[in-house]
């Protein structure tokens, strides 16, 4: 509690002096015992409330002014909302809100009252006065009992030190009697954060002001918002990464399984191939966005209720598994027939051949395409914003909505690039390596054959699987 | 029948409507080296591949030792353990070193211990003259070296028969010799071999019996001298005439 | 994969990037030239809330399309605005139709737009003349756009499923709740209910679907819409708390277009005068006193 007795005391005596009945009681007590002095403030407090419940404070809040979070930061403009109910047989002619010492008002500061009868807005004439220390609203026609008074002070900055702050108030009734109301509802203020102090510093810089005077730069590359968005979007970035880092590994075994079904032979093979090809073609032939909608809004109708983050992971994994299945299938089929024959001629059975000969080679071949798929899937996590999964895009969107500025999107783009660019580079290196390795593997004739085989495989890989 | 390791009886093979083998009979005795010659498309490779069931015959029977391998109930992998094959395109496993190429099937199929498989692998590499290349990857070896590793890989399985399917056709001329030397010494060691090749010199020197195939049938067979020096059949004469 | 192909054409890719950068820098320098002068006197916008346009008020009424009032809305807020098939319907739509008739203009509603992007579009002034999507007039929004005189009073509602047993918004402490992104409902919940996790939705109907599926415990949105939705569609839900905020809706106009604002205000006043407005209001909100339409 920041408020000290020292500030409460004068207000207590203030109220005491203005009220005859309490004053005489107090005088009586004072005359009888000195010890009562200590109790005085309590008595005033407790006795005065039930006696004159003219205005009951119901709510005191401040709007978060943190660029990327939900805290109230001291020293930065915010909006304070104060609500009180007018009690029985009272009429309120004016209300004064006293801001904590050290508060300031910023440019564009403004105070206004809304008067409500239950849920109905009552048009009320009002004369506001606003300074850095207090805000007063006079009602030429006093506000009658039973109504709710809602006062909003816009662009006032609370003190910059961390702590709980209180808005003390006083009101004057229609007979001119003034009553003080001690603030009892704390507003939690955190001291200026490192981010906010950098932003404040940027605010002062001339080059920043010049920079921001160019519309394009201000809207897309606002320095203050870049600083705000980097920490602000960090958790969104982690959440997006989390989605794909769990979803993608999940998609790999599913995709591998489906690719085997796609290549199934033997008696039941036709049915397995048919079912798996339906899965692959439906998943790849419809937008991921649509699949998300079906999963997120359809499953609840079946009474299935999955955590939306988990469901997001599942949808991504299912979607990606279809693409991966085709990548794996093409990869496996791109392995030269001779590898199967050599394995067979050595007496290895189909499963041994798959696991010890074919898949190890496939892995190397599909790493570039599978990494591309990873990148696509990572970018597609952004679609989940539309179905209410908190991820990067959602964080960026709400910052954009709060600031009316595109810069958070640019920062979000950079966050995506932090992941995708190195991966793209890795793909390039891998492909080079792979090309080199394959080029050396075989002698002239075999080499030609193999080249044809692998280029065919690449075509295979490159045709089927672009996301919608 | 006991001295025949492989007995082929009236073998037919069609690919769709194309009949590649039109009734082939062939017995191969233990320790015998049989070289099959013939123009391309004559069915000689198909015949070889039928012997370890890489191609499934459409008619006829094949016995390997006492097993009827064309019987669907036969576990063909058991037979393949005993029939080594060397391919035109080597077909080494590119992700494994020379040594591991040789060890893989020993471990997985013959269930040999790692140390035993490794010992045998090194021994076989020594035999083909590549003892110092054990840890090389296939991509780091020349074609001839790769083919010798492939031979070592097949030999490590202790095969009773070795099949060579144009083992030198994919090699640059200067590399052919090393592979042929390995094959020659293998033949001298008493290995039963069926060899499909275009190397006439090798056939003349090493073969116990030369078979000339054309149009899906065996046209003529006999000792190298008989076939090369006194071919009876017009088609054989034609073929040999073109070659030399 | 497309990426793969791009990689294979790495050089082409590089060339493309270079071209784009060049184009961008050209744009930048062009922008710099154009706006440097008028904004010199306007470098006081140290606030991070950037007003989207340089406020040069025009003395003429500007319309995106001549003779037509072009309106942007999310079209998902019955009874104010919703889509009937592909055409908008609702109180706001009929009101806008009346306003446009009064002004002798044609009315055009654009495709539904996400609520949280409409004001920025209004401020940019290139796509929309008016943002009409039950916008509460707030000081924050006034920094970005101007508002015409308020045409409707509203409050907030906190809606939850009946069987959840919540009694008031304060029961939601620490819970996952939702609101349409950028709405006053969203900021009220964040400001007044401690410890909540807020899920913003593009559309209120998406939020309602999430409420039904149990994805969120409660949804905060405007009380008249809550009443309508509960009565007509979401009968399993209830308003657990009506929150008196006394907010007022206004049409959003670009700050650069004060004449349009004045003309609209005149039209609204005329509609009030001749009874059209009250009749329309009574059609949608029977028994509720129509607002006075005073600034």
Image (cartoon, rainbow, N blue to C red):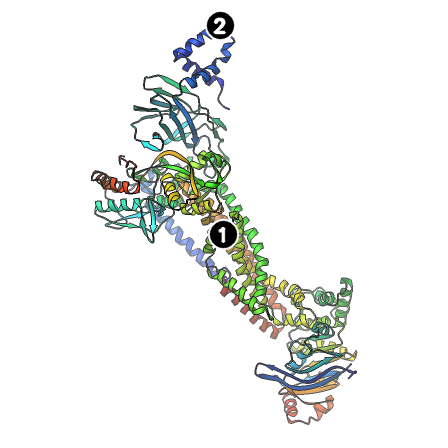
The chain carrying label 1 is A
Is A384 on the left or on the right of A143, as rendered? Answer: right
| Residue A118 position in % (x across, y down) | 36, 31
- Where is B103 relative to A399, above or below? below
Mark 1 or mark 2, earlier in chain: 2
**Helix, strand or loop for disc 1:** helix
Q: Hey, which residue is sitting farthest top in the picture? A: A31
Residue A202 visible at all: no
Residue matched to label 1 = A302
Query: In the visual, does B187 lie left or right of B244?
Result: right
Q: CA distance from mark 1 to mark 2?
A: 76 Å
Where on the picture, by quarter, is residue B203? Answer: bottom right
Residue nearer the viewer, C65 or A84: A84
For disc 2, the marked residue is A32
Relative placement, left or right, of A108 versus A357 is left
Front residue of this view, candidates B221 and A141 = A141
Contact flag, marks 1 and 2 (Cβ < 8 Å): no
Q: Residues within 10 Å of mark 2 (few under 14, many from 20)?
A: few
Residue C254 coordinates in the image, percent (x, y): 31, 42
- Secondary structure of residue under mark 2: helix
Is residue B196 in view?
Answer: yes
Is residue A56 positioned above or below A385 on the image? above
Q: Position of residue A21 (x, y in %)?
A: 40, 11
Please report the residue visible at 30 percent of the width from the left and 30 percent of the height from the top.
A123
In this picture, is C244 found above or below C232? above
Q: Chain of mark 2?
A: A
Is residue B235 or residue A271 the one in the foreground? A271
Q: Is residue B1 left or right of residue A364?
A: right
């Amino acid at each position: 509690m920041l408020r000290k007795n020292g500030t409460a005391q004068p207000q207590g005596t203030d109220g005491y002096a203005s009220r005859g009945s309490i004053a005489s009681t107090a005088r009586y007590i004072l005359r009888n015992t000195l010890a009562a002095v200590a109790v005085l403030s309590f008595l005033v407090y407790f006795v005065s409330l039930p006696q004159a419940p003219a205005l009951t404070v119901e709510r005191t809040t401040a709007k978060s002014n943190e660029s990327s979070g939900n805290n109230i930061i001291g020293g930065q403009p915010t909006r304070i909302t104060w609500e009180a109910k007018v009690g029985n047989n009272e009429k309120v002619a004016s209300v004064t809100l006293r801001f904590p010492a050290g508060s300031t008002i910023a440019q564009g500061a403004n105070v206004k009252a809304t008067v409500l009868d239950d849920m109905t807005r009552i048009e009320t004439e009002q004369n506001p006065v606003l300074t850095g220390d207090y805000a007063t609203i006079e009602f030429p026609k006093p506000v009658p009992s039973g109504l709710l008074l809602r006062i909003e002070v816009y662009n006032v900055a609370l003190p910059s030190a961390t702590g709980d702050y209180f808005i003390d108030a006083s009101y004057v009734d229609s007979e001119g009697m003034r009553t003080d109301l001690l603030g009892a509802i704390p507003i939690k203020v955190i001291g200026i954060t490192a981010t906010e102090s950098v932003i404040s510093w940027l605010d002062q810089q001339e080059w920043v002001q010049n920079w921001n005077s160019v519309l394009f730069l201000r809207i897309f590359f606002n320095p203050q918002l870049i600083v705000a968005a980097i920490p602000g979007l960090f958790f969104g970035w982690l959440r997006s990464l989390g989605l794909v880092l769990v979803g993608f590994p999940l998609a790999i075994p599913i995709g591998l399984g489906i690719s085997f079904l796609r290549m199934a032979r033997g008696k039941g093979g036709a049915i397995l191939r048919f079912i798996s090809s339906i899965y692959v073609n439906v998943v790849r032939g419809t937008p991921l966005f649509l699949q998300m909608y079906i999963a997120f809004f359809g499953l609840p109708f079946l009474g299935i209720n999955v955590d939306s983050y988990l469901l997001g992971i599942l949808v991504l994994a299912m979607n990606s598994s279809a693409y991966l299945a085709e990548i794996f299938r093409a990869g496996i089929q791109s392995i030269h027939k001779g590898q199967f024959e050599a394995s067979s001629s050595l007496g290895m059975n189909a499963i041994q051949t798959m696991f010890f000969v074919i898949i190890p080679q496939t892995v190397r071949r599909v790493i570039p395409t599978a990494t591309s798929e990873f990148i696509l899937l990572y970018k597609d996590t952004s679609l989940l914003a539309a179905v209410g999964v908190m991820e990067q895009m959602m964080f960026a969107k709400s910052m954009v909505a709060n600031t009316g500025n595109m810069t958070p999107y640019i920062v979000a783009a950079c966050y995506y690039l932090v992941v995708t660019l190195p991966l793209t580079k890795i793909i390039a290196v891998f492909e080079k390596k792979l090309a080199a390795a394959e080029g050396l593997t075989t002698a002239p004739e075999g080499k030609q054959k193999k080249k044809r085989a692998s280029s065919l495989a690449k075509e295979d890989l490159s045709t089927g699987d672009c996301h919608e | 029948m006991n001295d025949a390791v492989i007995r082929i009886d009236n073998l037919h093979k069609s690919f769709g409507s194309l009949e590649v083998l039109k009734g082939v009979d062939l017995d191969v005795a233990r320790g015998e080296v049989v070289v099959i010659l013939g123009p391309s498309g004559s069915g000689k490779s198909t015949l070889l591949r039928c012997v370890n069931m890489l191609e499934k015959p459409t008619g006829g029977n094949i016995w390997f030792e006492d097993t009827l391998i064309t019987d669907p109930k036969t576990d063909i992998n058991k037979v393949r353990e005993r029939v080594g094959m060397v391919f035109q395109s080597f077909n080494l496993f590119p992700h494994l070193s020379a040594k591991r190429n040789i060890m893989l099937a020993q471990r997985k199929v013959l269930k040999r211990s790692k140390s035993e498989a490794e010992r045998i692998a090194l021994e076989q590499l020594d035999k083909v003259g590549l003892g110092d290349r054990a840890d090389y990857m296939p991509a780091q070896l020349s074609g001839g070296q790769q083919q010798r590793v492939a031979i070592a890989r097949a030999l490590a399985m202790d095969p009773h028969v070795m099949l060579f399917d144009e083992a030198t056709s994919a090699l640059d001329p200067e590399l052919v010799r090393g592979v042929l030397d390995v094959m020659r010494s293998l033949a001298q060691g008493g290995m039963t071999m069926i060899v499909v090749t275009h190397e006439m010199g090798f056939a003349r020197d090493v073969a116990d019996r030369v078979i000339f195939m054309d149009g899906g049938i065996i046209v003529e067979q006999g000792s190298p001298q008989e076939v090369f020096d006194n071919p009876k059949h017009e088609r054989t004469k034609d073929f040999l005439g073109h070659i030399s | 994969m497309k990426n793969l192909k791009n990689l294979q054409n790495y050089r082409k890719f590089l060339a493309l990037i270079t071209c784009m950068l060049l184009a961008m820098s050209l744009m930048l320098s062009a922008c710099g030239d154009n706006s440097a002068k008028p904004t010199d006197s306007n470098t006081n916008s140290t606030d991070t809330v950037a007003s989207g346009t340089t406020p040069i008020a025009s003395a003429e009424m500007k319309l995106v399309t001549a003779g037509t009032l072009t309106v942007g809305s999310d079209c998902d807020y019955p009874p104010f605005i919703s889509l009937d098939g592909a055409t908008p319907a609702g109180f706001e739509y009929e009101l806008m139709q009346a306003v446009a008739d009064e002004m002798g203009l044609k009315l055009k509603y654009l495709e539904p737009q996400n609520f949280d992007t409409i004001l920025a579009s209004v401020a940019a002034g290139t796509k929309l003349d008016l943002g009409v999507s039950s916008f509460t007039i707030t000081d924050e929004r006034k920094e970005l756009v101007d508002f015409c005189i308020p045409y409707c009073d509203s409050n907030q509602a906190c809606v939850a499923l009946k069987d959840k047993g919540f009694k008031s918004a304060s029961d939601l402490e620490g819970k996952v709740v939702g609101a349409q992104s950028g709405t006053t409902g969203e900021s009220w919940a964040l400001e007044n209910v401690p410890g909540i996790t807020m899920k913003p939705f593009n559309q209120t109907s998406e939020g309602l679907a999430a409420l039904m599926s149990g994805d969120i415990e409660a949804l905060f949105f405007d009380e008249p819409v809550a009443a309508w939705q509960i009565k007509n569609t979401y009968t399993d839900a209830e308003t657990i708390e009506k929150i008196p905020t006394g907010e007022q809706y206004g049409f959003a106009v670009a700050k650069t277009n004060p004449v349009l604002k004045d003309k609209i205000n005149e039209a609204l006043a005329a509609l009030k005068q001749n009874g059209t407005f009250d009749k329309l209001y009574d059609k949608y909100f029977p028994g509720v006193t129509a607002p006075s339409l005073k600034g």
